Amino acid sequence: MSTINLGSIEKIPIGQGICFNVDGAEIAVFRQRDGKLFATQNRCPHKQGPLSEGVAGGGKVICPLHAHKFDLATGAGSEPHECVKTYAVCEQDGSIHLSL
Amino acid sequence: MNNPKPKLVVIGNGMAGARVVEEILKRARGQFDIVMFGAEPYGNYNRILLSNVLNGSQQAADIFMNPLAWYSENGIKLHAGVKATRIDRERKVVIGTPLKKEAPAYAVDAAAMPEAAVIEETYDHVIIATGSRPFVPPMEGFGGAGTFLFRTIDDCDQIAEYAKTCKKAAVIGGGLLGLEAARGLMTHGVEVTVLEAAPQLMIAQLDAEAGQMLRGTIEGMGIAVMCEKITTKIVRVDGRIARLDFKDGSTLATDMVVISAGIRPIAEIAGASGLSVNKGIVCDDQMRTSDRHIFAVGECVEHRGRIYGLVDPIWEQANVLADVLTGLNPKAEYLGSKLGTKLKVMGVELASMGETKPSLPDDEVVIYREPSRGVYKKLIVRENKIAGAILLGEIDTAGVLMQMFMADTVVSARRADLLFGTATGAPVLSVFDLPDHAQICNCNGVSKGAIKEAIQIGKCHSVSKVGGCTKAGLGCGSCKSLVAQLIEAYAGEVTEDPSEHYYVPGVPLEKSQLVAEIKRLGLKSVSAVFRELGGGKEDPGSKVGLASLLKTLWPGEYEDERDARFINDRVHANIQKDGTFSVVPRIYGGVTTPDELRRIADVAVKYNVPMVKFTGGQRLDLLGVKKDDLPKMWKDLGIPSGHAYTKGFRTCKSCVGTDFCRYGVGDSIALAQKIERRFQGVESPHKMKLATAGCPRNCSEAYVKDLGAVAIEGGLWEIYIGGAAGGSVRKGDLLCTVKTHDEVLTLMGRFMQYYREHGKYLERTYHFVERFGIETLRKIIVEDSEGIATRLDAGIQQAVDAYKDPWKEAELPAYPAQFSAPELAHALAVAENNG
Ligand SMILES: Cc1cc2nc3c(=O)[nH]c(=O)nc-3n(C[C@H](O)[C@H](O)[C@H](O)COP(=O)(O)OP(=O)(O)OC[C@H]3O[C@@H](n4cnc5c(N)ncnc54)[C@H](O)[C@@H]3O)c2cc1C
Ligand code: HEM
Ligand code: SF4
Ligand code: FES
């Protein structure tokens, strides 16, 4: 397992997510208003909507394209047979540390 | 496999066929191998709701009760689109052939596919549930383009499609279905005339006086009614329908005809197979035909000389048949049904049951009439029981009356209670007293017992939860009050279902309460609302709705937390299916200049825009733009945002009006430009698309816009509200007629503000206007009946003043990553590698 420093936490607007392209893999990192960080695959399993552009909060994100919902901690989806990959992510000294 | 199971073949996959199979599965899942033939190429849908499909209040997809998956999940083999033609009783096989797609499922000579293989299914038992077909009274010229019946989803589609090409439509038949068809047609923008052969409407369910009163109500809705008209001929000119000729020598001009003049059982298959058929397929009290292995159920049945045309009796038949076939109660008997109905025409409240006139000397008749409100109530009491009742215009007690009528309950000595409820508010009939088998929801055949179980065991404490669990209340909806009473009786009180009344799911308050609390606590941001009113829990599904509300409530003061915006409003562009965006610059009133066009073209070239397209709103759309190009393009364009992404004012289309058009009577271009300059950027519960037309030819389609202004002779402007021409199509309602552009701007603004304050989140104006009614809105907005006009005008002015072109954020992003592309991070950035 490797940990990547994605840089300052301030890059992510509070309450939103942004997308990182980590060696070709798109990973969405969310910064919740209560300070919690979450990371998931960026592309929605439904039709590849960018989850980083979705509305997030309360540990969930809503895909901007067709509003399927995903649990940011477990990756579980609102529709049967749909889930997303999640990654461990945390903040250390003001930077985002992502574990792959 | 060991002993094969007995095989059951069901012919007809409509409401009766599918229901009887459901009842059988409920009693003995796995007892039979089940095969079904259905002439319609679908699963089973709720035919009753076709009226809603035609009037646009429901989509065809919403009315399916048994979609195709249901059959496979339950191990049922369905031959969809296959018509059974004969039962070979010697060999015990049912024979069928696939139908051509365009053949109506109920046609007598429905065209079979010529080369289609014959399908054979052996059987142990057969159930015939072929239903009925519309009856066409003898007349010349029926059939072919422009003539329709009203029975299937396909009929609905074809009627709606054809109505688009018509101005006038005639409905032959003024019964329950004819009126529902007429109301449905009206929503397609045609002038409708109902033609009835009898001297009154709904002769089967109403007495003459109620028929007359109903006629007034129907005419008041804009549907013309002609009674005692017998059509003899449909006359065509150049291949298109031009008029109808009547027996009395008169005529009526029309472009299309829908016939709804009664039904006839589909019994050919029984006849062809040698079963006894009279008016319908003759059945005994166990629903058995003249062959003991063959049963029938539904509208194709004749039982004790009667044929039924409503679902209620069918459910009773299906229950009996399922009891008999599964052996649960081989002696179960169907003894005939009592009939009660409710008219499902938007804007007409009407319920009728049993007899319409007294027939025995001791029958007691109670009548209440209030013509000014169109209210008529009649009760026929025989031996202290209800023999019949008619409720028109006000039907609060209909549910209870129907129960008492069906159950032969002895009624209260004070008859008035039956028509108006008791003076003390105590229930006329205690739901406790109903037996468990009493049917509460007649549309879906749900008994009190089933509802009680859902309440007590399933813990469904709201009307919609009970509906989700049992289907009760999901048909015509008239039993909802009884369901509520049952919840009260068995669970103490009715829980309102959050999703029904809350403004957003995550904050348990209705809009008015929510607004009051937000104002009282002075909450100006979405996170503050969650903190104070949402139990401290953030709900992503509620953020956007709250943001829209707060922005309306606190113009200028709203604390705009960008994470509460939908992506389109974060980046002021529409997200596309591939994650790219579109750029739509504002083009006021659809009028542009060569210089603007040149800049748009230059930008499209410079940023490799894959597609440039005219929008439906008279402007240009640059599609397929990368997020990080957005601000650069806006700067280069130097045109404000067209807000093609917001829930709010979108655009105002115009026609060429007086400037160039030879028909124009009003300056539609100047008006459109004024409207667009004034209201650009104003947010609302859902989008608002506008148009102005220079004359009633309506080239800019102003009649079907959220707000529209149409110039008419005499230098006047008509203002329409609540029109729609998207997934739903609705002609707007005329709000008022005014003289000047300024008056148009004022009244449009006032309506917008009222809609902003009272609309539910994501409620389009066409629902909003229907919910309040045009009369009410006219009083408030034009006549200022509530004295709030000044406040509304000030409110919209504030929103107008708060306008800032969001594309100015190109210069100064609202936050650093607003327009960033995905950030690259790779192996170089690895801080530590702990293997
Ligand atoms: C627009 C509309 C509104 C209505 N509103 C109400 C209402 O408010 N309340 C009410 O109680 N009732 C209402 N009704 C009546 C109700 O829909 C019918 O009573 C009910 O659908 C009858 O059920 P059924 O199964 O007998 O017939 P159907 O539902 O017609 O089903 C019969 C099916 O069998 C198929 N079929 C026929 N012959 C063959 C064959 N040889 N082989 C294979 N398949 C075959 C037919 O295509 C059809 O799909 C309404 C009907 C319509 C059309
Ligand atoms: C002399 C009068 C008229 C003029 C000058 C005129 C002009 C135009 C023009 C230039 C267009 C745009 C065509 C295009 O985009 O390719 C148009 C579209 C249209 N016209 Fe006319 N027209 C006239 C009369 C009518 C009438 C009488 C009707 C209706 C009864 C009508 C209905 C329409 C409709 C529905 C459109 C399409 C609108 C849209 O795409 O949004 N026109 N008209
Ligand atoms: S609506 Fe009337 S004025 Fe406007 S372009 Fe059409 S015909 Fe001319
Ligand atoms: S792509 Fe995510 S919901 Fe459709």
Image: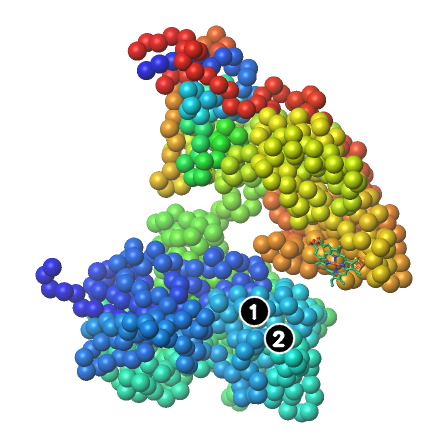
Give me the residue at 66% from left, 26% from top. B632
Query: Which residue is at a point 40% across and 63% down the rendered structure image?
Result: B42
Amino acid type at circle 2 is Met
The residue under label 2 is B256
Q: Is mark 2 within 8 Å of ligand 1?
A: no
Q: In the visual, does B18 lie left or right of B388?
A: left
Crowdedness near tag 1: few (<14), some (14–19) or many (≥20) residues, C-alpha within 10 Å: many
Give the Cα distance between marks 1 and 2. 9 Å
- Snapshot quadrant of residue B184: bottom right
Q: Label 1 amino acid?
A: Ile
Horizontal side, residue B202 vs residue B370: left or right: left
The dot on residue A32 is none
- Residue B18 lies left or right of residue B161; in this view the side is left
Q: Position of residue B191 (x, y in %)?
A: 68, 71
The answer as to whether the residues below labels 1 and 2 share one chain is yes
In the depicted structure, whether residue B655 falls above or below residue B288: above
Chain where mark 1 sits: B
State the residue position of label 1: B159
Q: Quadrant of residue A25?
A: top left
Does residue B310 lie above or below B474 as drawn? below
Secondary structure at badge 1 equals helix
